[in-house]
Image (spheres, rainbow, N blue to C red):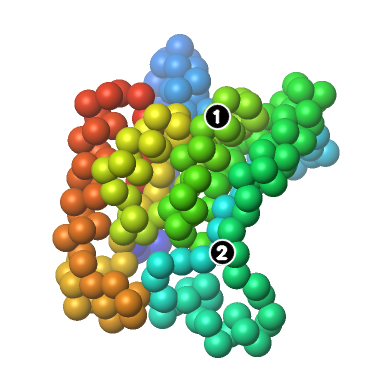
Amino acid sequence: MNNNFYNKTRTLVKTFYESMPWQIREGIRNIYPSRFAGPLYKLLPMAVPFSLHIDPTNLCNFRCTFCPTGDLDLLRTVGRSKGQMTVELFKKIIDELSEMCIASGQKVNELHIYKDGEPLVHKEFAKMAAYVKNKNVAESVQTTTNAALLTKDRTMEIIDSGLDLIRVSVEHVNDNGYKKITKIFGDYNLVKENVKFLFEEKTRRKNFGGFI
């Protein structure tokens, strides 16, 4: 996106928001608290992390040309091992975070169950998301996925988990483009259908925050 256009749009939206009655602005802030965090310097020192990434796995089903995770030779040179986090370790991290939140009366603004790998490679991803939501340690629990593994069953599990937001990384808009970028995957229609089902199901059930 053109930076000049982005800046003008951002300024316009900000001006429009600030012109609203305070009651409406307060309502919007309550619905989307993670979008209205104050300046970081005003929050220091922090009793809990402002934003937190927990990687359930550093494995990925793609080998994207732009991503270090897909560069196996590079990973070997730095000696990074491959693997998946156990559910027990994940729960231990969240339990300790919960103690911090209770002691401080604060929560993490955004908790991302994702970092370097494809989170849906982990078969227990939905269980992890549900555990975080039940512990109430974050204003917003999010993830990012390439959606190739977002089957109907996985979609239902994720919606049931209460995950607040899911970002979908679309690598191209046709099969050849996907194969060129990911090296091993070339089914754009599968990604499109998976996302379509997610959107339709979360809309029908009205209990899932959204996706980008």
Q: What residue is shown with label 2?
A: 58
Outermost residue toward the top in this view: 23
- Residue 178, placed above or below residue 106: below
Q: Position of residue 179 (x, y in %)?
A: 26, 77
The residue sitting at 57% across, 53% down in the picture is 56
* Residue 79 as seen in the image, left or right of residue 165: right
Count the labels in the image.
2
Q: Closer to the camera, 84 or 33?
A: 84
Amino acid type, mark 2: Asn
Of callouts 2 and 1, the N-terminal one: 2
Separation of disc 2 and disc 1 at Cα?
22 Å
Above or below residue 152? Residue 133 is above
**Does 204 sit left or right of 8 as displayed?**
left
* Front residue of 51 and 150: 150
Q: Is residue 16 above or below residue 83?
A: above
Residue corresponding to mark 1: 133
| Horizontal relation, residue 18 to residue 194: left or right | right
Q: Residues within 10 Å of mark 1 (few under 14, many from 20)?
A: some
* SS of the residue under disc 2: loop
Mark 1 and mark 2 in contact (Cβ < 8 Å)?
no
Report the residue at 77% width, 36% height from top.
96
Amino acid marked by disc 1: Lys
| Secondary structure of residue under mark 1 | helix
Label 2: how many residues lie within 10 Å, few (<14), some (14-19) or many (20+)? many
Q: Position of residue 208 (x, y in %)?
A: 37, 30
